[in-house]
Amino acid sequence: MAKRDYYEVLGVTRSVEASELKSAYRKLAMQYHPDRNPGDTEAEVKFKEVNEAYEVLKDGEKRAAYDQFGHAAFDGGMGGFGGGGAHDFSSSFADVFDDLFGEFMGGGRRRGGGQHGGQRGSDLRYNMEITLEEAYLGKQAKIRVPTHVVCEACNGTGAKDPNATVTCQTCGGYGKVRAQQGFFSIERTCPTCGGAGKMIKDPCTACSGTGRVQRDKTLNVSIPEGVEDGMRIRLSGEGEAGMRGGPAGDLYIFLAIKPHAIFQRDGTTIFCPVPIPMTTAALGGSIEVPTIEGKLAKLSIPSGTQSGRQFRLRGKGMTPVRGGIRGDMIIETVVETPVHLTSKQKELLKQFDEAATGKPKHHPESEGFFAKVKELWQDLTE
Ligand SMILES: [Zn+2]
Ligand SMILES: [Zn+2]
C-alpha cells in the first residue's frame, strides 16, 4: 500500500507552521485515540499514521528531508529516522497527555533519557471505578500496581560496581553512531550504551543489569472531589522505573464512575426524577428528597403540580473538579397513580369524579388535548 503524504494525513498545507501543525495533530490524535475507539482497527491504523506523520513534520530536520525526498528519505536500511518509531511515538503521545491533562494534577513531567543513558520507564495505566458519592466527596484510595521498581542492590545503576566501567565498543565511547542514509549522514544515539559511551563491567546479579526489579507497588491516590467519568489523573514518576537509572514513567489513573441508582449527572448538575402521590400533586404538600450528600432536603410541592415539573435545589449538585461554585440539583416530579384501591377509596374517587363541574377546568391538559383532537378530525372530515 502506498504511503499517504504526511501533510495530507494531518490535513495541513506544506507551508503549515508549528503551532497549526500541532493543533491539527492533536485534534486527529484525540479523534483516533485507541481509548476512544476500542476495538476499532481502522482508527488504530489512522492513529499510527497520524503519529508517524507528526513525528516527521514536527522535527525541522526530518521535515526538510521529507520535503526534498518524500518517504524515500526514511527508507534506509539502518533504520535512521524511521527506526526509533516506538520511542518517538511514546514521546509525542506524551505531548498530547501533557497538553490535555498536564495542568490537572500540576507538576512538570520528567522526560527524556537519563543522565546515565538509562531508558525512561513505561507509563502505566490503572483503571479505577468509583461511585458518584465518592466523586462528590473525593477519595483517598490505596492501589496496588504490578510494576518495575528501582533495584535496591545496585541503586538502579545495573552495575555490581558502578565505578567499574568499560568503553562502549559500538560507539567507541562517543555515545553516538553515524549512519549513511541516502544522501545524508545521520547521527543518532548509540543503541548499545544509550549514549553514555561506557558500559558497566559486571552487571548487578539482583536485576541482571537492568537496574530494576519487578514488584507490586502500593500507592496512595488522592481523587479530588468533583471528578467526572473518563477523567485521568497522572501520578508523575509513579510508572515503571527506568532502565539503568533512567527516569521513571508516569502512572495514569483512568476514572470511571458507576451509574447511580437514582441520580443522573451532567457536569455539576444532578438530576433526579422523584415520584409523588397523586393526592400530593393535586393538593400540594411537602416532600423529602435525597441529596448526593446522603441527607434529605425538603421540597414544597404546590397544588396542581403535574408530572415532569422541575424544581431546582440550588447548590445541591456537584462541585467542579477545579473548584468554584457548586452546581444545582434538579428534581423532576413523576405523579404516581394509586393502585390496589379499597372499595372505599374507589367510591371516594367516583364521588370526586361526579363532583366535577366542568368549570373551572380540572384537567386543563387533557381537556385541551381532546379539544385539539376534535378540531383535527373536523378538519379531516370537511
Ligand atoms: Zn541491580
Ligand atoms: Zn555506545
Image (cartoon, rainbow, N blue to C red):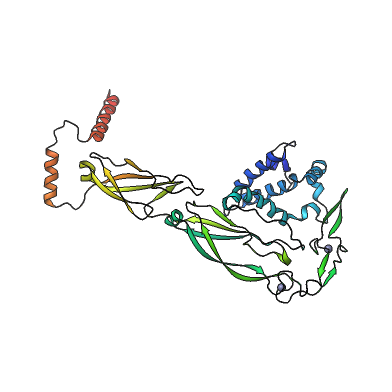
- Give the percent coordinates (x, y) of residue 322: 51, 48
Which of the 4 quarters of the picture holds residue 241?
bottom right
Q: Relative to residue 203, is residue 269 depicted above or below?
A: above
Which quadrant of the picture is home to ligand 1? bottom right
Q: Quadrant of residue 327?
A: top left
Give the left or right position of residue 11, taking residue 340 as reference: right
Which one is nearer the viewer's eye here, 158 or 2?
Answer: 158
Q: Residue at x 48, y 45 (%)?
A: 324
Q: Nearer the viewer, residue 51 or 260?
A: 260
**Residue 179 in sight in this render:** yes
Most extreme residue toward the bottom is 205
Residue at x-position 65% and y-position 41%: 23
Percent x, y of residue 361? 19, 32
User: In the drawing, does residue 40 fall left or right of residue 115?
Assistant: left
Q: Where's residue 156, x and y in %?
A: 71, 69
Query: In the rendered image of this protein, does residue 17 appear above or below residue 182?
Result: above
**Of residues 127 and 78, the one drawn nearer to the viewer in this rendering:** 127
Q: Quadrant of the C terminus?
A: top left
Residue depicted at 42% across the width and 56% down the height: 133
Q: Give x and y (percent) for residue 100.
A: 60, 48
Labels in figure, total:
0
Residue 42 shows up from this direction: no
Report whether 224 appears left or right of 189. left
Question: Viewed as shown, does residue 333 lie left or right of 220?
Answer: left
Looking at the image, the residue that sits furthest to the top is: 382
